[in-house]
Image (cartoon, rainbow, N blue to C red):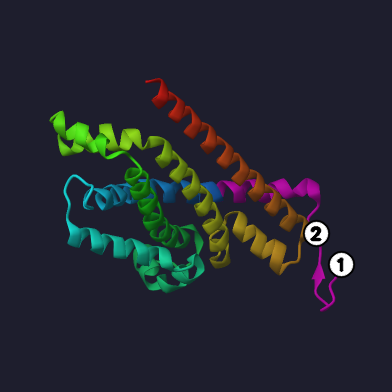
């Protein structure tokens, strides 16, 4: 037990007890990230494909649609996550019936993640040589076949890199969502590390978050390298 300058009493959690708090919180973080990434990759990936293919280089150029989608994506990426989370509280409550906990955190994380991933997918497709789409058209492939077997297949390493970046961002967002009682590592850091001045918990959450991000980035980089090597081989 220690007394802080303002008279607040605080007691650090013993190191051998930290895992009892950390493991459930870590599982909640991955539960949030897993749910969010399912929607982000599915919806954001589709939006990114449409963004690219409605541009002048795409399969079905639609300038007006492209500008409208691009504006929506830019708007979704403009707000800091904490501001976005507060701004859509009525929408979150309408969907989930609550403004706290994991359901309330998942909605703003999805809303923030979709435009971010969509832009990354569009950029990945934009980096492809124009010949990738042209060869598909000359071969008589359908729109679906060209998108899946030519565009997305060739852009797969860049898309995996985008997924890696998005997972890291969602872990960061889940930590911010701890401020609304969403659970996870962020909630543990806020309630124990900050509000209760528990230095052991704060140090443990920082170490776990850093180690997790480093591991995700390492795995993502290895996957990207393996996919590029596979493409070069064939």
Labelled pair 2, 1 in contact (Cβ < 8 Å): yes
Query: Where residue 63 appears, x then y in whole percent?
Result: 19, 59
Check disc 1 and report the residue beneath it.
2
Measured in 3D between alpha carbons, the distance from the residue under mark 2 to the one under mark 1, in whole angstroms, is 9 Å
At horizontal 40% and vertical 70% (from top left) the residue drawn is 88
Q: Which mark is residue 49?
A: none
Q: Quadrant of the N terminus?
A: bottom right
Q: Residue furthest left?
A: 140
Query: Where residue 191 appears, x then y in whole percent?
Result: 66, 64
Mark 2: few/some/many CA within 10 Å (<14, 14-19, 20+): some
* Looking at the image, residue 65 lies above or below residue 221: below
The residue lying toward the viewer, choosing from 102 and 34, is 34
Q: Is residue 141 visible?
A: no
The span picked out in magenta is 1-28
Residue 13 lies in magenta, yes or no?
Answer: yes
Check disc 2 and report the residue beneath it.
12
Q: Quadrant of the C terminus?
A: top left
Residue 92 placement, left or right of 192: left
* Looking at the image, residue 135 lies above or below residue 24: above
Mark 1: few/some/many CA within 10 Å (<14, 14-19, 20+): few
At horizontal 36% and vertical 47% (from top left) the residue drawn is 121
Q: Earlier in the sequence, mark 2 or mark 1?
A: 1
């Amino acid at each position: 037990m220690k007394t802080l300058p303002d008279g607040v009493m605080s007691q650090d959690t013993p190191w051998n007890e930290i895992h009892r708090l950390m493991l459930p919180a870590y599982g909640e973080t991955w539960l949030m990230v897993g749910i969010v990434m399912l929607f982000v990759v599915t919806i954001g990936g589709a939006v990114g494909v449409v963004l690219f293919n409605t541009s002048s280089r795409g399969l079905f150029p639609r300038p007006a649609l492209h500008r409208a989608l691009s504006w929506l994506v830019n708007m979704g990426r403009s707000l800091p996550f904490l501001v976005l989370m507060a701004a859509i509280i009525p929408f979150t409550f309408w969907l989930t019936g609550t403004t706290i906990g994991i359901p309330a955190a998942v909605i703003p994380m999805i809303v923030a993640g979709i435009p971010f991933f969509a832009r990354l997918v569009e950029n990945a497709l934009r980096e492809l040589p124009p010949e990738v789409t042209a060869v598909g058209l000359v071969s008589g492939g359908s729109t679906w076949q060209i998108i899946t077997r030519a565009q997305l297949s060739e852009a797969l390493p860049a898309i995996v890199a985008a997924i890696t970046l998005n997972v890291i961002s969602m872990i960061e967002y889940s930590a911010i969502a701890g401020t609304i009682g969403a659970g996870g590592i962020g909630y543990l850091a806020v309630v124990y590390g900050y509000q209760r001045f528990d230095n052991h918990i704060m140090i443990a959450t920082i170490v776990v978050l850093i180690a997790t991000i480093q591991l995700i980035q390492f795995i993502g980089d290895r996957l990207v390298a393996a996919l590029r090597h596979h493409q070069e081989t064939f």
